[in-house]
Amino acid sequence: MTKQPPAPVLGTRALNRATLDRQLLLRRSSRSAKEAVAHLVGLQAQNVKPPYYALAARLDGFAPEQLSSLMADREVVRIVTLRSTIHTHTAADALTLRPLVQPARTRELTAFRKGLAGVDLDRLAALARDLVEAEPRTMAGLREALRAEWPDADPQSLAVAARCTLPLVQVTPRGLWGRSGQVALTTAEHWLGRPVESAPTADAADATVLRYLAAFGPASVKDMQTWAGLTRLREAFERLRPRLLTFRDEGGAELFDLPDAPRPDPDTPAPPRFLPEFDNLLLSHADRTRVVPPGLRGRAWQGNQAYRTLLVDGFLAGVWKLTEDALVIETFGQRSRAGERDAIMAEGARMLATLHPGASYDIRFGAVAPQAAVPQAVVPRAVVPQAGG
């Protein structure tokens, strides 16, 4: 038997550049907003604005109305999927990914067993479906309606059970740029006029592995399990092994990849990028050192609060916030390379022009995270040009 040569090792910068390329962050893409949402297998969206900022960083010629129109036309939706969090998905992905992650939603209910004592979950799902398909309901409204049926159960547990057992989407105007309303829910089937896929198959799992690698690879089994919030994905990777390339990272972990996926030179330039809080780039690998330097682990978070993040040379290098009159940028350490601050400010101005055209903002280097104390440097206020100007 011929001994197989050892798998090639991919260093941190090689993984960084490969991931940035697939995340459309190495250079802006000409894809449409819908094509980008599909390629990225969704955008994390606990809040309304992050998907818009995520696409502004990735797409050439993006305008927020492009995503808003897709949402208003029900071509993309907001739904709980990966990692038990709200994501913006294409309609097709909402109908196929939700069944794939249903085992995690079912496991989530174990934490609410006491509050659901004596509750028939099948009956609850049927009643909740009737309620939200009759008219979209807020979580509070759904909670109270279910409590009338099970007065001794914990109201919050009842609402969580509805969310876990049914594919509930947030109806518009929630999620629209500049016009977002309160969260109101109905079923994906009712909102989209199409059935959710039946129980996930091996083919569906395999297809999702391939899509994950196309958007986040090269990656390990643990990386994808972190992204999906699922376990037991090794089987799918093993079925696909003959179709995939394998590598090792510098720690020896096995990485899988698509044969024709881009793996740029590690020295490929990576321009600054302003990303929203909860961007999937920073959340979709068990080992995040391909984007987050070890010394900066935890710097993008304060308790349960995630900061909006700045990439410089492809890696986490700071955080930012937008106030009423300023874009405030806090960098971790001095940015002393020639032209680096100028490049950061230019990218910040471009982001503002894309999402807030015509507005008037300062661009400041200062403190964003409470633990930091950084002296401020201010770029004088100017009217942000119209996008594309």
Image (tube, rainbow, N blue to C red):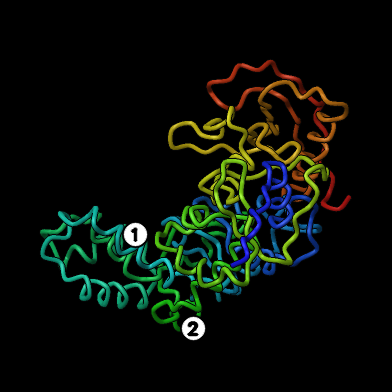
In the figure, 352 relative to 179: above or below? above
The residue closer to the viewer here, 288 or 51, is 288
Residue located farthest toward the bottom when viewing the structure as drawn: 194
Q: Residue 14: horizontal and vertical position, in percent?
A: 72, 46
Given the image, on which type of amino acid does mark 2 rest? Gly
Relative side of 131 to 333, left or right: left
Q: Secondary structure at mark 2?
A: loop
Q: Residue at x 48, y 31 (%)?
A: 302
Quadrant in the picture for residue 73: bottom right
Residue that label 2 marks? 193
Q: Residue 208: horizontal and vertical position, in percent?
A: 54, 69
Q: Residue at x 69, y 22 (%)?
A: 333
Between the residue at mark 1 and the residue at mark 2, the CA separation in whole angstroms equals 22 Å
**Mark 2, other Cα within 10 Å: few <14 / some 14–19 / many ≥20:** few
Q: Residue at x 67, y 69 (%)?
A: 34
In the figure, 100 relative to 357: above or below? below
The residue closer to the viewer here, 177 or 253, is 253
User: Does residue 182 appear in the picture of this structure?
Assistant: no
Residue 139's tag is 1
